[in-house]
Amino acid sequence: MKTNRTHLLYWISLLYLLIPVVIFVLGWLSWLIAVPLAALIAYLLISAFPGNLHPDATNPLTRKTIIFSGFTSLAWVTTSGVWNFGFGRTQDWDVMRNDMLSTLTKYPWPVTGTFPDSPSLWTMRHYLAFYLPGPLIGKATGGNLSITLFATGVWMVLGVWIAFLLLLELFSRFGNRKYIVLFLFVGFSGLDAIGSRIQGTLSLRPSSLINGGHIEWWAERFQFSSNTTLLHWVPQHAIPSWIGALLVIHIVRSRQNLSLIPIVSVAIVLWSPFAALGVTLLALILLVNVGLFAEFVRSIGESRFRTLAILLTAIPLILFLQSGTSEIPHSFLFSSGSFSHNVALLAKFIPLEFGLVAILTGLVVRRTTKEQVVISVALSMVLMVVIGLYNDFAMRVSPALLVVIMVNAGEALISPSKSMKNHALRISLGCILAIGSITPLFEIISRHQTPYNGLQSPCLEGTCESDLTSLGLRSYNWTEAPVGVLRNP
């Protein structure tokens, strides 16, 4: 039975996810929509706040747990290069995210701009939640880009810290052994080193690791990123996926507060539509798997005003995000390329990226076998859909589902057992996870070898080029169509 202290951690997680949504609502939407919508979000937070808190309820975990997880999150985020300290940021930051933060800091909201190749006034349309807190603080300090970047790093640490606290609470019954799962989380990855070697794109020599690199595209048409890769390259997708997935796991396993699940999904939409889809899919899978779906539907029906508030909150966010997106490419995996080649890639990818871990985990902890199977099937189905230039659907929906694989693997590793068979299975599982950790090592070494660059003036001013302003990615980041829910620029 979860205590109100744990429920307070749920509420803190929802607060973190919804803060940038409120910033967006009040900073971008028409006042006729913004004011009532902000009131609805406040209602959702108030309705989710746990009642009857005891005096010690403000401390859902021990002081040791809070401090240790905080320092671990700080160290991990530091390797992303957001603050320098010997690390530089990934290419995605250099060509896109840095300019996004600068533009949001220097330009009035909602951001609009014109381009030399078009006479129209374009409006920025992007999943903005991750980006907004840092620039808001930068704006408040006179448009200081250094403060924007520093605050964005702090925002990342807070998100990772909350995810770590949720993770440790899942393993609270294991005492000090629970801290092992933090390092498992940081190092969790598929067997990219083996996949890359099979495909001939990586030589397994010490020099390969010393030189760093990005080794996860060995399957050509799809990839599932390691947790460290996600943090370094796409924190806007990673952090809400982790928090959302861990919240869903807590709620389903405790069989309490089922009506909070739709709030979680809506809170994530503006962070990442793909992450919201992944968390929602995970929730449906877990609810059906444990026979709670009917009770979940009943809980929704019993909270009609909350359900209405959730729907009314979602509508303007979805209208904003879908405006002008029809040109983004989308298809099914088998609609292009050789059928036999696609099947051959899947036959390698599925066992190496999650299949072996799922099987061994199910053999060690038998009660997770069914859950591992249904999650593995869902991950395989995710690969069938292709959206975006780089198959963003598979990469960004999968993290929420992979959290379950990782959590169950952690339980398999640290659960006590006297069975010799289980010892052998655990050793095999540990070896596979250790080989997988080669991928985050590559990423961290690469960040250490990457030059650090601060934020520069927005490229909309014509001083530079970035993916934010490029013609090829225009439909990903801007809309030419009027967005009725936005405030007039």
Image: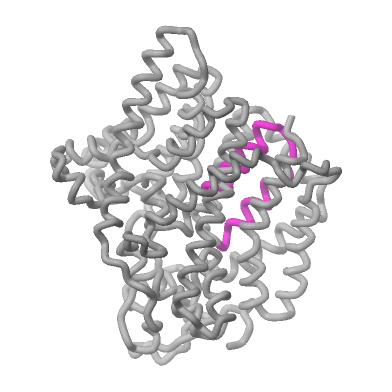
Q: Residue at x 33, y 46 (%)?
A: 223
Q: Is residue 116 magenta?
A: no
Q: Residue at x 47, y 81 (%)?
A: 480
Q: Position of residue 16 (x, y in %)?
A: 63, 57
Q: Quadrant of the N terminus?
A: top right
Q: Is residue 266 magenta?
A: yes
Residues 411 and 258: in front is: 411
Residues 389 and 333: in front is: 389
Q: Looking at the image, which residue sits at the far right?
A: 52
Q: Residue at x 37, y 70 (%)?
A: 96
The magenta segment is 242-270
Q: Residue at x 42, y 57 (%)?
A: 234
Q: Position of residue 437 (x, y in %)?
A: 33, 38
Residues 257 and 375: in front is: 257
Please tell me whether residue 377 is drawn above or below residue 415 in the rendered image. Answer: below
| Figure quadrant of residue 175 | top right
Q: Quadrant of the C terminus?
A: bottom right
Examine the rendering and report whether any part of residue 465 can be seen: yes
